[in-house]
Amino acid sequence: MEMPNEKKTFKQKLFHELSEYGINVIYLTLFFGVFALARRLTLAHYGIYIDDYFIALVKALVIGKVIMITAFLNISKKFENKPLLIPVFYKVFFFVLFVVAFDVVEGFIKGWIHSGSVPGGVEQLIHHHFSKMWLGGLLMVTFAFIPFFMLKELSRIMGHEKFRDLFLRNRQA
């Protein structure tokens, strides 16, 4: 486990944050990519072709950054000493709320730009942004976060090096 009193250089901190962000983005890109591919194939079956090839990566970059920002604020550490399921589901709920908040702000800004007025932005948000597709996306993010935060919590409890070695090193017989 990492020593909490150990001073890290700026370079070490930067490497740690970028590698953490990279892991978040890779996981989320793979998860969202599978859903985007399933949607694309389903629609193609009905003769509807879409070309949203990079939407999974863009969503992963944004949501990965939301995760990093909210983790930096230390407000998600409330139940870290409880049984594993409690902090996992707390973080899932907490981070889903942050993703929803960022998504609502993004939808409002898009509507505002598109309509040219604040009331038009609100109308666009209410009538066009919130839909069954939005609800499906919300469920997708929620279920993507469950194994994601389960693994992050296991890594925190076991120690990051020991956890990484468990997946990347040969074990002795």
Image (cartoon, grey):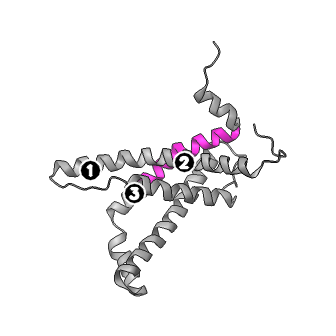
**What's the residue at 82%, 48% (across, down)?**
7
The amino acid type, in three-letter code, at marker 3 is: Gly
Give the mark, 1 or 3, whose residue is nearer the N terminus: 1
Q: Residue 96, how many percent across, how many down?
A: 52, 58
Give the mark, 2 or 3, whose residue is nearer the N terminus: 2
* Labelled disc at residue 40: 1
Which residue carries the number 3 mark? 137
The amino acid type, in three-letter code, at marker 2 is: Asn
Q: Is residue 124 shown left or right of residue 169?
A: left
Q: Residue 143, how many percent across, how many down?
A: 46, 48
Q: How many marks?
A: 3
Say if mark 2 contacts mark 1, CB within 8 Å.
no
Is 161 in front, or is 77? 161
How far apart are labels 2 and 1 at the CA level? 24 Å
The residue range painted magenta reads 140-157
Q: In the rendered image, which quarter contains the C terminus?
A: top right
How far apart are labels 1 and 3 at the CA level? 14 Å
The amino acid type, in three-letter code, at marker 1 is: Arg
Is 41 in front, or is 134? 41
Say if mark 2 contacts mark 3, CB within 8 Å.
no
